[in-house]
Amino acid sequence: MTMGLLAGDGGGGGLGYNTSCGKTSGLVWNLTSSYADQSNEASMMSATVIMFLLAALFFNLNLFSGLSDTSAILDPKVRVVLSKALSLFLPVMSYLFSEAKNAGGLACGGAAAPELPLRARLILTWMLLVELLRNKVEEIRMQRGDDGWHRGTVERAGRVVWLGSLVFFNLRGAGRKSVLGILWLLCVAKLVQRVTFTLVGKNSLAYGKNARLIISYMHHVPHHQPLQQQHGDDADHGDELLQRCRYAVMGEDKLVNKPTPAGYSVTSDITTAPTTTTVGKIWRLAEDDPFLASVDQDGRLRRLCLSFALFKLLRRSFEHLPPMSEAETRDCRSLIFFEGGLYCSSKRSNRSNGQGEDEKAVAAAEELFQVMKDETIFLSEYYHSVVPVALASPFFLLANYLLLPAMVLLLCLVIVVLCGNGDVPFAFHSLRSDNYSVSFGVLRMARCLLTRVLSSPSVFFSTIDLSITLLLFLVLVYEQVWEFVVFLFSNWFLVSMLHGYAAKPRWRRSATFNWAIRRMLWVRSKMSHPDITMRQFSALRSCRLSRQLRMVPAVSLTLPTIPVPKEVKHSIAEYLLLSATSLQEEDDCDPTATRRGLLSNGQLAVAEYAELRRACKSESIAEVILAWHIATCLFEEKFPSPHASPSRDMVVATTLSRYCAYLVAFHPELLPENEESTERVFEIMEEDLRRTVGFWRYHLPAAVAPLLGSGYEQIMRLEERPNLAQALEMAEMSALQRGAILERALEKEAKCAAGVEGMWKVLADLWVQLMVYVAPSGGEEHVMGHAKVLPEGGEFVTVLWALATHTGMRRAAPVAVGSMEHV
């Protein structure tokens, strides 16, 4: 009855519409007429609900993606959800499209409708818009050997062909066919665009084949001895090693003569090749060129180019290629840590005035870890980006964002003319006459609908459908703008611009280029730049649910996440410097020896304490971590910081303790031992904790029943043995028992000459050593573990792993079980 009244409202006066709003009555009736048949009501309602949820999801996903250095990546958990939803979308909506088409035929008295019903056209519009939004979900895969993209491309091509058949075989009006035909053409353009990205990337020496090319390139890079060996330890060499660095930034693909059985034949004159930009060339140019020196006063651009060069070196680890040679790791170690390299030159020439030596060292550590963080961002964006940032260059900007849209616009005009059977005036006139939203105007139609949205169910449903369509259009426009902004202000495009500036002298004389660089840097300074973060997990304080459901990926997101404290970065950087020096000494004594440096599971930190040293002798690194984590938590409870801000050593010890415990609980694949063994150690510790504190105190939320405090004494009663040395050597003890005993030993030492601060210093050194010890993992399983966490934002241990890989830090390979039985 309501729909009949609305359809009969010609002038609109009876319903409160103005004269022009009366034209909307027929639209509302046509859009909601399928609900008249109650057998189709559920199908029509399902279409609206599905599209509302999907449109809201895409809207929120785009709205909160943010403009940051990692916004080219979509979180893999979100991608999985969207991929599964979109895989079911086309068949479900195709069925609902058929239902709407048939319902329109029934509404016309059972006769074949001369034109596709409005409801079916709306569903078809939704299907085309969602197909255009798939780019937000699909990664751009350019790595060699990854042939999985063929299947996805064929599936997407099949969807596009199916949608084209629905458009051109069901629509009759020239104007309606033109509008939906343009949307279909955009789907085709997006498909061709993605296929082109993949094929060009996979077959390019600058992208897909670059990892193999870099191996051949590095054979021609001259090796240098550390500068302190050449000129003496006390000489100030500035950044001489960086200025002489031949690591390729861009343009090395122009040096290839031909492929060979061993790789690629590269011209031997790589040091003077004008088309190739190296780290040293950028570093020297920043010192000599007035413009580059003015925009790179803090060295951020130079360090970004170094990160890009290191990213190219690290790609071979992810693509199953030969690792860096000993000579290459020795050079990289010198470049990063020794005199004339990154860390030491940053400490000597930090540009902040009035800084003391400690402040300069902290700033140098920040710069070192920012270089490694940028490298991991390059890695994650190369392998998991949904935006073509890896192809970023001025030429690609012109081709993809200027020439391609112009070509698509021309094809859209052709589609309009073809839909009008070649009659140009008729074709363009029908665009307005056959499409009510074009002739009447979307805003006027929305205003008319809103005046009746609360009083008429038909208008209410029409308003929802219109809102969904507008929301999808807005999301589509936003996604295109978002992609362009992310591309334009990405690290990739900035490195490409610097390569052009270094390799093409005419760019240095261009006022346009200088203006563009300054504007880019100004905008980037206003954008968010993610810091290195670490999650914090306490076996005694964190939520019990997060522990019990630790294998569910989303649960780890509930844990607190903090930026890595500068004290932690400084302590680890200083320890890595000592380790690099030790590695260099090992190399001087025996060039064939296995490089280990100062890798220690904490024994070096407690070498002076016999009772504590025994706790580090376990074969399982997970047992060592959990035992010392329990001891650190209990020691913190016993001796909290007397000041508002804890001491440096306390910050280092507590944050690294909680992060290492988080790795054991949530990412055992990143630790240097069997994943199942790590999980078993953690489960034993949990079971022991549950028995110790009781069922209710263990399972209730931490805010209701905190484990520490009232449960502290129960845990400490685990240590009832007077002989600590004998207790620590008992293999059957759990990590919780070992931790309680260790805390007693720490408390005993703290009451002696060492003092509380002295023991916090011991704990800080121990956790730094443990953190560095777990980082270097060259096994295939561990490398794939790091690759898995890259699109999730990466882990701090992945940054350390990359640094360890570059500098040649390795642990001795574990002895296989049973390997000694036949000796």
Image: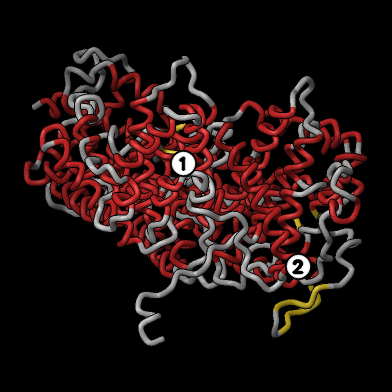
Q: Nearer the viewer, residue 160 or 361?
A: 361
Disc 1 residue type (three-letter):
Leu
Tell me the quarter of the image containing the C terminus.
Answer: bottom left
Protein image colouring? secondary structure
Is residue 519 left or right of 54 when viewed as pictured? Answer: right
- The structure residue drawn at horizontal position 48% and vertical position 56%, both measured from the top left corner, is 786
Q: Say above or below: 526 vs 628.
A: above
Q: Nearer the viewer, mark 1 or mark 2?
A: 2
Local crowd at mark 2 within 10 Å, few (<14), some, or many (≥20)? some
Local crowd at mark 1 within 10 Å, few (<14), some, or many (≥20)? many
* Element on which disc 2 rests: helix
Disc 2 residue type (three-letter):
Met
Q: Nearer the viewer, residue 156 or 521?
A: 521
Does label 1 or label 2 sit earlier along the sequence?
A: 2
* Element on which disc 1 rests: helix
Can you identify the residue that label 1 sits on?
431
Numbered label attached to residue 820: none
- The structure residue drawn at horizontal position 47% and vertical position 38%, both measured from the top left corner, is 763
- The structure residue drawn at horizontal position 44% and vertical position 36%, both measured from the top left corner, is 62
Is residue 367 left or right of 233 when viewed as pictured? Answer: left
Is residue 145 left or right of 433 when viewed as pictured? Answer: right
Q: Residue 571: x percent and y percent?
A: 59, 38
Q: Residue 805: x percent and y percent?
A: 60, 59
Q: Nearer the viewer, residue 148 or 432?
A: 148
Q: Residue 788: x percent and y percent?
A: 44, 56
Q: Nearer the viewer, residue 296 or 664?
A: 664
Say which quarter of the image contains residue 709.
Answer: top left
- The structure residue drawn at horizontal position 11% and vertical position 41%, both measured from the top left corner, is 41
Is residue 594 left or right of 496 when viewed as pictured? Answer: left
Image marks 1 and 2: residues in contact by CB distance under 8 Å? no
Can you identify the residue that label 2 sits on?
218
